[in-house]
Amino acid sequence: MKALTLLQAAAALRSGTVSSVSLLEQSFAAADIWDSRLGIYLTRTDELALAAAQRADDELAAGRDRGPLHGIPFGVKDLIAVAGLPTTAQSLVQHRFRHPNHDAPVVARLRAAGAVLTGKTSTMEFGCGTPDPEKPFPIPLNPWDRTCWAGGSSSGTASGIATATVLSGLGTDTAGSIRMPAAFCGVTGLAPSFGLLPASGCIPLAPSLDRVGPLAHGARDCAAVLTALTGQSAGANDPFALPAYGAGLSGLRIGLVREHHFPSGADPALRGVFDDAVSVFSSLGAYLAEVSLPLWNEAITATMVTVSVEGLAHHHAQLSTQWQAYTRSARGLLALGALISEADYLQAQRVRMAVQELTDQLFETVDVIVCPTAAISAPTSTELTDESGLQDPKVFAKIFTPYWSATANPVLSMPIGRNAAGLPLAAQVAGPRMGDAVTLRVAAAFQDHTTWHEPRTPPVASVISAPGAGE
Amino acid sequence: MNAPDVAKPYAAVLATGLPASGAEPDAIAARYREMRPAIAALYAVLPPAELRICGPTSNEANTL
């Protein structure tokens, strides 16, 4: 069976060419191939999923249609509570919240919309840091090159979508944890406007930054998930309904940001790939203007200060007693928070407010802003840390997600091309506060006229002859 | 908590009460030292507002 996007699968379900159970069997087959090779899941829920898929099919047969997510396999990042299942945060430290007795609201809403949970997907420990081979957890690898990282921290959700193991899923984004793995795995991920979705039931990293959001193949798929996540229904009153397929962007103003985004060491293909994407926007009738993001360096610093200080506030007690249980890069990032003064933290929040004010002003002149998600494709797993075991700042400085974390704006990452090695390159589309609909609309219009987001078999499949085969 | 004495990185990290040991305190303090100029720059772009009874206002950006 050909790999499908969420909305293609939804249409196929209603035309009777597939069933929820057959979609799930396809997901199981993909998981059997990929999970052990890429570290997609921490927990698979095959039996529960099969029962849910059967219910979904029975309901559709009886004329009850819950909307586009009905019968669709989805994964949930293991920072998000699912009733009765372990929520490990991919950490040896996590005990208190291990078996929650209720779904996080975002999970409950997806289930109410008929989506079929297939399991809990891999992450970085507590949503931060980098993989640690000393710990007994999967190392999330990239479907396009297994020497490379899947990106983090919504790693398994992104690599699961790229391999048709799931058709959509949930991630969380504090400094880029939805957008970065989406970019590196070649799928689409949306960090919705801060506050649009409830973060309760999700293990926090930095509560003033944390967002929950959808990943899927395309922006139209993400819009369908966002509708369900906000408790809305598809149809006439859907706040995230998009224009018909193929609609242009006539009259829309797109701000393009190149400044800071093509540093020394950027992928040689990035400039051409980004220019090609700009040409697509131009051909769709959008008005294009080069813009500059205010307080670029300061916004990124403010985000990183906030992550460390708020993260430490959550973890201080456990760090004090279980230091060695944390991964080296996570505990280093959190411990930085103990060296940052209260005044510095508060100044970082003042700067965030200023950045928000200034970006609000910028969005009076443009409808959305487009810039590369990262200057690089997925780095190799060995490039992520320096000799001390902490995150290598030279690598992470080339990932541009933290700027938009400092603000409350919705921001989406989508694939826009590939580099010479065939690895995905991506762009961010940011909208005004609570402008999730226009953000999705611009990405959808781009994807209506390009194919980078469409399901395709990752090249590593060519070395695997059959499910369960050796390397 | 005051800004740590990063001239003594090992001691600065140990003073946090976190049980880092071996080479880690030096590595963490070194990372903080690298961040210091960027943190100092936060004050340069947005100087402390005049003393006021209320907190920062939505017009904070106008002080830029």
Image (cartoon, rainbow, N blue to C red):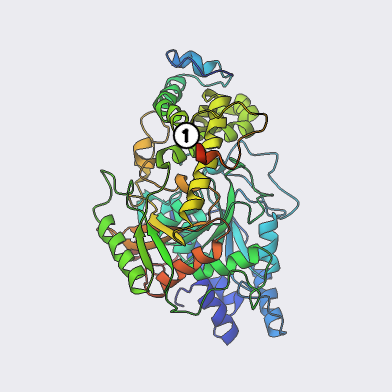
Q: Quadrant of residue B15?
A: top right
What x and y, as percent, mark residue A387? Answer: 36, 30
Circle 1 chain? A
| Residue in the picture at 53% in, 31% down | A347
Viewer-proximal residue, A219 or B63? Answer: B63
Q: Relative to residue A396, is residue B20 drawn left or right?
A: right
**Above or below A469: residue A210:** above
What x and y, as percent, mark residue A114? Answer: 67, 70
**Above or below A245: residue A105:** above
| Residue in the picture at 51% in, 33% down | A305
Placement of the N terminus of chain B among the 4 image quadrants = top right
**Above or below A240: residue A432:** above
Check disc 1 and give the amino acid type.
Ser
Q: Residues within 10 Å of mark 1 (few under 14, many from 20)?
A: many
What x and y, as percent, mark residue A139? Answer: 46, 46
| Residue in the picture at 70% in, 39% down | A96
Q: Is residue A143 visible?
A: no
Q: Quadrant of residue A365?
A: bottom left
Mark 1 lies on a secondary structure that is helix
Write down the residue under mark 1: A329
What x and y, as percent, mark residue B64? Answer: 47, 37
Instruction: Point out the residue furthest to the right here.
Output: A101
Q: Is residue A11 visible?
A: yes
Viewer-proximal residue, A442 or A454? Answer: A442
Q: Relative to residue A155, is residue A322 drawn left or right?
A: right
Q: Quadrant of residue A310?
A: top right
- Tally of numbered discs: 1
Q: Relative to residue A443, is residue A310 drawn left or right?
A: right
Viewer-proximal residue, A289 or A283? Answer: A289
